[in-house]
Amino acid sequence: MVEGHGPKQRRDAMSVMDKVKSMLHGHHDQADKAMDKGAQMADERTGGKYTDQISTGERTLDERLGMDDNPTGDQGMGGQT
């Protein structure tokens, strides 16, 4: 088995996600703004070289945290593409 990919690591990762979800409860707008800002900063710092990957990561995090409030399929990063 590859180290770092076993059942214990998955449980730990889920535990972390549960904790993050709990912390974000009731603070959806603030968390969404922070994630948009972080994605925008990452995109700027990489010179736009990884825009697609950053947007995919942002959408995935939104989905995993249950914050996917963008059913229209617009790109992440605060609506920028």
Image: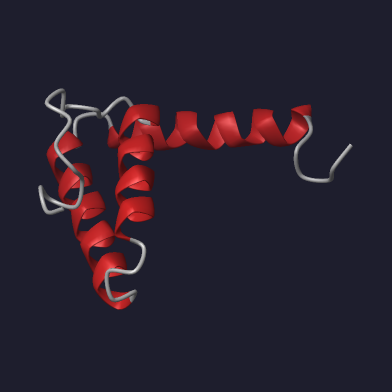
The residue at the point 34 percent across, 28 percent down is 63
The residue at the point 38 percent across, 36 percent down is 60
How far across and how far down the image is residue 16, in percent?
53, 37
The residue at the point 35 percent across, 44 percent down is 56
How far across and how far down the image is residue 39, in percent?
27, 58
How far across and how far down the image is residue 12, in percent?
65, 35
How far across and how far down the image is residue 77, in percent?
19, 52
Where is residue 61, by image quadrant?
Answer: top left
The residue at the point 31 percent across, 67 percent down is 42
From the viewer's perspective, tell me whether residue 40 is left or right of residue 49: left
From the viewer's perspective, tell me whether residue 73 is left or right of residue 35: left
From the viewer's perspective, tell me whether residue 70 is left or right of residue 4: left
- Residue positioned most to the right: 1
Quadrant placement of the N terminus: top right
Figure disc tally:
0
Q: How is the image coloured?
A: secondary structure
